[in-house]
Amino acid sequence: MNRRKFIKNTALTSAGIAIGSSLANCKNKSTHSTEINALTTGANVKSKLPLVIATWSVKEATAKAMEVLDAGGNALDAVEQGCKIEEANEKGQSVGKGGLPDRDGKVTLDACIMDKHGNCGAVVYLQNITHAVSVARKVMEDTPHVMLAGEGAKQFAISKGFEPEDLLTEASKQAWEKWKVEAKYKPIINIENHDTIGMLAIDKNGDISGACTTSGLAYKMGGRVGDSPIIGSGLFVDNEIGACVATGLGEEVVKTVGSFLVVELMRQGKAPQKACEEAISRIVNKPNSNYKDFQVGYIAVNKKGETGSYSIHQWFSMTKFQNGVNEQIQSDYFLKT
Ligand code: SD4
């Protein structure tokens, strides 16, 4: 099973990224999925709850989330537990421990989480704490705030019992050192792996939650924060309607408030697939858009359990666990020629 990979070719002045990915479709039958609620989707396909979807190829993460859901756990616990799998995976170089650092060699994490009530929490520019998604949840549940940044977020995490640790692994350090030699701090072209995890789940009660966690763009400017921890951009959940999460060049997602847009389009009656396509079209149809140089991808789910995914470039994928099948689904995309 190939892990997701994608190549970034970017002029950092415009912060563009182009993403390619090696995908393999494979199915992983769950033995513990329970049929709770049969729903008829727009395509007249019987679907069952619970379900979980996530950006890229993250079958271990969706399996963990489904384990929580199958056991009767709620969607909020499911997305947190699912995201933690990738955060702890040192081989994934764009999430949690082992994430590629900024241009100064610092691993800085962005994450957010949102529940069925519309409560949300986020951390930005968090250092030395692997499970950014769990800190985001603590911000949501244990503070009157939505977002904590940098040192304040770190101190808050430590006060909540999170152990500080060095997140820069040997592999990521070596990659950064290689980048420094080639880029000489004036990077024109970059190559990186990138695979922010965004996850959406519907539990047996039909309630929706979502989470998103990333180390952001590799070799970014110190202090840079992307879309992933920004409620409405990287993630949005409306339990009455559905949810969306984004990946790709965060700057472009923020400029179109992408995830909120997708949910609002679903509110107007669009299926998740059509809503994701419309949100991508808002980016590529901007005057002077240089969309050929960067990737953005959305995944979405509605209250009925219908899902969709769409990206600018080929090779974006979604992992979906539903009806006992944990599968990687290659996304349709805009740039066909
Ligand atoms: C960011 N959206 O920091 C993130 C990057 C990403 O897969 O999604 N990578 O801009």
Image: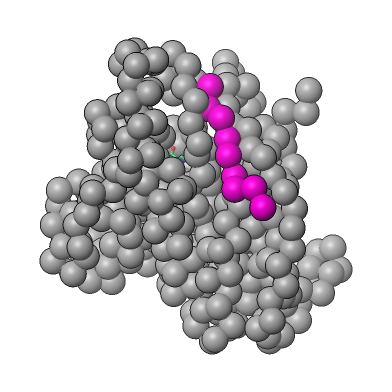
Quarter of the image with the C terminus is: top right
Look at the image and say whether residue 284 sits in the magenta stretch: no
> Is 117 left or right of 281, judged from the image as shown?
left
Count of numbered marks: 0
- Rendered residue at 61%/52% (across/down): 57
Q: Position of residue 172 (x, y in %)?
A: 37, 38
Percent position of residue 50, x then y: 63, 77
Q: Which residues are magenta?
A: 1-9
Task: Tell me if I can see residue 114 in this picture.
Answer: no
Quick check: 331 left or right of 288? right
Observer-nearest of 96 and 90: 90
- Residue sitting at x 56%, y 63%: 60
Q: Return the x and y of residue 126 as percentages of the image width and height.
A: 25, 48
Determine the residue positioned at 25% across, 55% down: 129
Q: Nearer the viewer, residue 22 or 301?
A: 22
- The image quarter containing residue 186 is top left
